[in-house]
Image (spheres, rainbow, N blue to C red):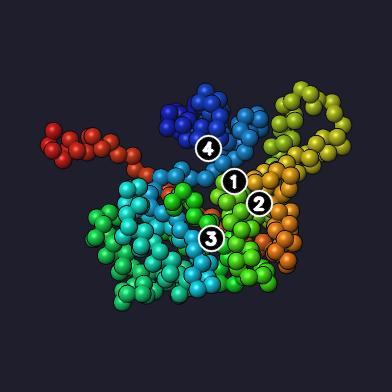
Amino acid sequence: MANISAKEVQALREMTGVGMMECKKALVATEGDMDKAVEFLREKGLAAAQKKAGRIAAEGAAYAAVINGVGVVVEVNAETDFVGKNEKFVEFVHGVAAAVAANKPADLDALMAAPYGNGRTVQEEQQEMVLVIGENIHVRRFAFFAEGVSVPYVHAGGKIGVLVNFTTALAPEAVETAGKDVAMQIAAMNPRFWDKTQVDEATLAEEEKIMKVQMENDPKMAGKPEKVLEGIIKGKMGKFYKENCLLQQEFVKDGSMTVEQYIVSAAKAAGGEITFKDAVRFEKGEGIEKKQENFAEEIAKQLGK
């Protein structure tokens, strides 16, 4: 039997929302394999959905803006939340976004070598920030849309940055409200896909497999004809799309319509057409595991106690 640590149990609990005892049982049954444990819980109907998003750990800020017609979203990390609110740090984040818009770099290396706008490169300005602020600061990632109409949204002072990109002949100000509403939906719901057409065959097969196992374990489903079971699976897949695909999701601000229907409605009200093309959602510290510090012990060490 695998030796399961409390840390592993807690990690599985955070990923699935299932109780500690059930998480431990799942890890024991799967010999500590985290992915198999998630699947085990889902097959038993205990975990509603697989959530593999990394734990939010690193500080700093996510930021989105439209600069000279170019939609930009960036994430810049710092060591503490305090620095994330520092005026100089915020100014640096905005400057990085401006450098992305001006240079349209192909990748992170190209961005770091690009001019920041003050005679230094982005890399050199980052090094300057480390010296001035006294913390390890680094530009982590960026994305931009040079075509179409982009609408930015920043949630909770930089916890999440979202950039929505539309194809439309309407002026940017005519689609701003719709863009903000869609961006807020993305920030809140964090959909796995933008549209159901993007769901790959492997994901569909995995979902259907889990649904079948769940029904096999359900006494109410015993003896039901295969065609009935297929119909139930089809209905459950419809629910999967509604929960995981942005355009098929229930619109948070008006549950009587989907996000797709809201965009059509907003376009009609604006007197034109709006097509959702793409979006980017950055959550500060997503997927970075933060080192846990005991500050009392750290201070005691520094004082030689």
- Disc 1 and disc 2 in contact, CB within 8 angstroms: yes
Residue furthest to the left in view is 304
Which residue is depicted at the point 40% across and 58% down? 76
- Vertical order, 5 against 245 (above or below): above
Residues under labels 3 and 1: Cα distance?
A: 16 Å
Residues under labels 1 and 2: Cα distance?
A: 8 Å
Image quarter where the C terminus lies is top left
**Residue corresponding to mark 1:** 189
Q: Amino acid at mark 2?
A: Leu
Q: Secondary structure at mark 1?
A: helix
Instruction: Please tell me which of labels 3 and 1 falls first in the chain.
Output: 3
- Toward the viewer: 262 or 53? 262
Instruction: Please tell me which of labels 3 and 4 falls first in the chain.
Output: 4
Residue 235 locus on image (x, y percent):
79, 40
Instruction: Please tell me which of labels 4 and 1 falls first in the chain.
Output: 4
Q: Amino acid at mark 3?
A: Pro
Q: Residue 262 vs residue 55: left or right?
A: right
**Residue corresponding to mark 4:** 15
**Residue corresponding to mark 3:** 152
Q: Secondary structure at mark 3?
A: strand
Residues under labels 3 and 4: Cα distance?
A: 29 Å
Of the two numbered discs 2 and 3 in the rendering, the one whose residue sits closer to the viewer: 3
Q: Secondary structure at mark 2?
A: helix
Q: Amino acid at mark 4?
A: Met
Badge 1: few (under 14), some or many (20 or more) residues near its Cα, within 10 Å? some
Of the two numbered discs 3 and 4 in the rendering, the one whose residue sits closer to the viewer: 3
Which label was assigned to residue 253? none
Residues under labels 2 and 4: Cα distance?
A: 21 Å
Which residue is depicted at the point 49% across and 51% down? 155
**Residue corresponding to mark 2:** 246
Which residue is depicted at the point 60% across and 40% down? 50
